[in-house]
Image (cartoon, rainbow, N blue to C red):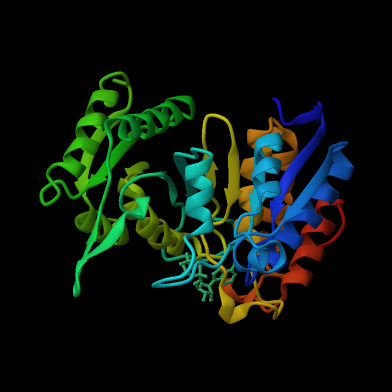
Amino acid sequence: MSHNVSPRNYNITLIAGDGIGPEVSGAVVRILNAAGDAAGVKFAWEPYSAGAAAFEKHGAYIPPELYQSIERNRVALKGPVTTPVGGGFSSINVTLRKRFELYANFRPIRNLPGLESRYPGVDLVIVRENTEGEYVGLEHEVVPGVVESLKIITEKGSTRIAKFAFEYAARNRRAKIHAIHKANIMKMSDGLFLRCAREVAKGYPQIAYAEHIIDNTCMQLVMNPYQYDTLLLENLYGDIVSDLCAAFIGGLGLAPGANLGAECAIFEAVHGSAPDIAGKDLANPTALLQSSILMLRHLGEAGMADQVQGALESVYRERRFLTRDVGGSAGTSAFVDAVVAALEGGEC
Ligand code: ATP
């Protein structure tokens, strides 16, 4: 891989982010460095700010050096960056996804051991198109009081995300893909998305293919998530369904994600910057840690990924150092100490 300096040294672009971002990314860096020391892997983290923090320092929401760092390293770990609501600068997340053509947003939803859930044993994969739909940001005021917002769906974008989903399913022995849509109303745009998915599905006869309407899908997910295996969604539907599915496994503090393209990958949690709990040692870094485990697998470090996953799971199984969002009373730092202790083979 081109981002390798030498086989087991990795330069990783690091965007700490806003709100709880510095806490959760600091936690992950600590855990990965500890795991790396044990495994003979070295990480050279290249920290950059983005969004409002970067504008204050560099006069740019995304400094050119950040772009260059991602271009060079091809792998980034990113905390949440706050996006102003109803005005202000464009989303940093969306800008990075577009710039690096990170067309696939991959979000596995799996319960951790030791956590009670109304939905035990969920094993779902969300594959969200990451560059099109309503997220293209083409909005304008036609006349005062009337705003037009464009949703762009292309054959190229729909086909490549469908291929990603089917390829993933084929390589990981997943049995079924549901394409999620609202083509009864958006006949042309969602209709095109479905036509592309059907066309791609023909090349994978071993994988069952079905289509569900988005509103029904939300109800069906809450009634019985086990009927789903891999969900293929447009950008906005994927965003909404991701938060819904995070609830199956204990909330946003747990759900990981990866933004993947042909050249680069940015790993980030599903959650946002959670300003309500920022700076209070309350954030759960599990979501970003699980994102970093996806990053390790992407880098070809499967053994190390298994070790970090094992340490994380042992802390959850033991339940002594869990954060408040999942029913514990430990702070972020005590949780991280426990994961590091578990990695080093000690008591957590
Ligand atoms: P965005 O629009 O940026 O996706 P959001 O509206 O989904 O953000 P978040 O910032 O993700 O909102 O957080 C929603 C709530 O979930 C927060 O108020 C917080 O209480 C909780 N939460 C999110 N992430 C975590 C975390 N890592 N640990 C603990 N609680 C969290």
Q: How many discs mark residues in the rendered view? A: 0
In the rendered image, which quarter contains the C terminus?
Answer: bottom right
In the rendered image, which quarter contains the N terminus?
Answer: top right
Left-right relation of 142 to 134? left
Query: Could you say which quadrant of the image residue 203 lies in?
Result: top left
Residue drawn at 87 percent across, 51 percent down: 344
Q: Is residue 208 above or below residue 319?
A: above
Residue drawn at 72 percent across, 75 percent down: 331
Residue 212: % across, % down: 21, 46
Residue 114: % across, % down: 60, 62
Query: Could you say which quadrant of the image residue 2 lies in?
Result: top right
Query: Could you say which quadrant of the image residue 67 lies in?
Result: top right
Residue drawn at 28 percent across, 40 percent down: 178
Left-right relation of 153 to 124? left
Frontmost residue, 69 versus 272: 69
Q: Is residue 144 above or below residue 126?
A: below
Residue 113: % across, % down: 59, 56
Residue 230 in sight: yes
Residue 219: % across, % down: 24, 61
Residue 110 in sight: no
Frontmost residue, 141 versus 331: 141
Left-right relation of 299 to 51? right
